[in-house]
Amino acid sequence: MTKLIYSSEKVTRFIVLTLVTLLPLSWVNIGVGSFYRYLMIASFLVFLLTNGFRIPIYKRNKKYLSLWVLLLGYEAISLFWSTNFASASNNRAASVLMLFVVMIVSNYPSSRENLIYIEKAWVLAGLLSVAVFLFGGRTIIGSTILSSRYSLVILGTITDPNEFGCLFVITMPMTYLLLSKQDRLFWKLTGWVFIFLEFYVVLMTGSRGALYASVISLVLSIGLARKLSVRSMILTTLIISTILFIAVRFLLPLIPSLTLARVSFDAVLRDGGSGRMDIWTSGLSNWSHGGILRILFGYGDMGVSGFNPRGVTTTMHNQIIQTLVNYGVVGLLFYIMLMFEAFISLRKLDKGLVGIFFGMLFASLTITMKMVYKPLWIFLMIGFLREDINQIIKSKNNTRNLNYR
């Protein structure tokens, strides 16, 4: 029995690390759906088989797991009152698959050592994303200041630059958090090389939301990961100043001038964030005129339209507003409850993770991050690794000398 449990834990760890590492392939379409969709299904089947077709539920995760099930379950039943049944049906499939992943990650062995394995997987995901960008196909779209950017082609699939760029909001600071624990100078320098490569890719995508969120995420993670003291504040200031100097001196000259103009604050103010403000106000107006039941329970996925001078869209480009119009005040309340519990869980694990949390929260104010956008939600699942604070303190000494090779 002990051997079976040990084996299931090893398999669960392998599945979770694989799901994190291969996140860049979530944009690759093969047949019906993405490659990652088939990976999620296969992972869940292997997980069930390894655990004797039962799903263990740990006491430490009951509250967090309940909030996940509450939100995903509510999204599922919203199908019955959705005004856009086709879109809602497609997104419900994504919710079911995400529930599969939730069940798997909630059984991931909780320890500081296993948290480090997760950090390594995110670093690998970032490096894979860099490789996909540098060696994959991409073309410039448009020639004006506000439309000059890159369209990514991952194994033949056109990928949204905003969504792709926001993956680095997680991987850049995760690289810092992992390699800052290493004493050897070589690994620290290697980590910063990785971070600058990722920052270069974010700039090249022309995604303003991803760029600003990446900076917020990295700066907060550096600051929060250090103990509050005059010395740490000075070191943090020096690190950030060095990053800015190197970025301005060496990275910016490599970026096309039109792309740099696009990510400037002047460009954002000039076009209102690509017309997002118009979409938000018109979308909220349409939502509020549907009666009390629609206000409370929403219109279902993509049931409300917003508009700007470029046209009409059902994508609000803001996760909070998207949740509100899709699932109403009730759905937004469930979303906030999950986010708050995620914040508490991540803070208990590592304060540096809170920086990533706020970076992704900012990014979600610029693009819609439904369950089909997997990086945000799989990052939040790290909260399942939380432990009793006494266990964390005891395990710290055992992980300081871990081999990071």
Image (cartoon, rainbow, N blue to C red):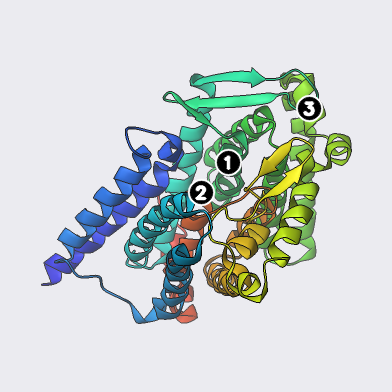
Report helix, strand or loop for mark 1: helix
What is the number of the mark on residue 260? 3
Q: Earlier in the sequence, mark 1 or mark 2?
A: 1
Give the Cα distance between marks 1 and 2.
8 Å
- The amino acid sitting under disc 3 is Leu
Q: Are marks 1 and 2 in contact (CB under 8 Å)?
A: yes
Tell me the quarter of the picture where residue 63 sits: bottom left
Q: Earlier in the sequence, mark 3 or mark 1?
A: 1
Residue 16, percent from left and from top: 35, 54
What is the number of the mark on residue 191? none
Residue 254 or 397: which is nearer the viewer?
254
Q: Earlier in the sequence, mark 2 or mark 3?
A: 3
Q: Which residue is mark 1?
A: 163
Q: Is residue 235 visible in this depiction of the protein?
A: no
Residue 3 or 332: which is nearer the viewer?
332
- The amino acid sitting under disc 2 is Tyr
What is the number of the mark on residue 373? 2
Q: Residue at point 75% right, 17% down?
A: 143
Question: Which quadrant does the N terminus fall into?
Answer: bottom left
Q: Is residue 190 above or below residue 359?
A: above
Give the Cα distance between marks 3 and 1.
19 Å
Q: Are marks 2 and 3 in contact (CB under 8 Å)?
A: no
Residue 172, percent from left and from top: 59, 44
Q: How many marks?
A: 3
Question: Which quadrant does the C terminus fall into?
Answer: top left
Tell me the quarter of the picture where residue 397 sits: bottom left
Crowding at mark 2 (Cα within 10 Å: few <14, some 14-19, many 20+): some
Residue 391, percent from left and from top: 43, 77
Report helix, strand or loop for mark 2: loop
Report helix, strand or loop for mark 3: helix
Q: Residue at point 15% right, 59% down?
A: 49
Q: Residue at point 48% right, 50% down?
A: 87
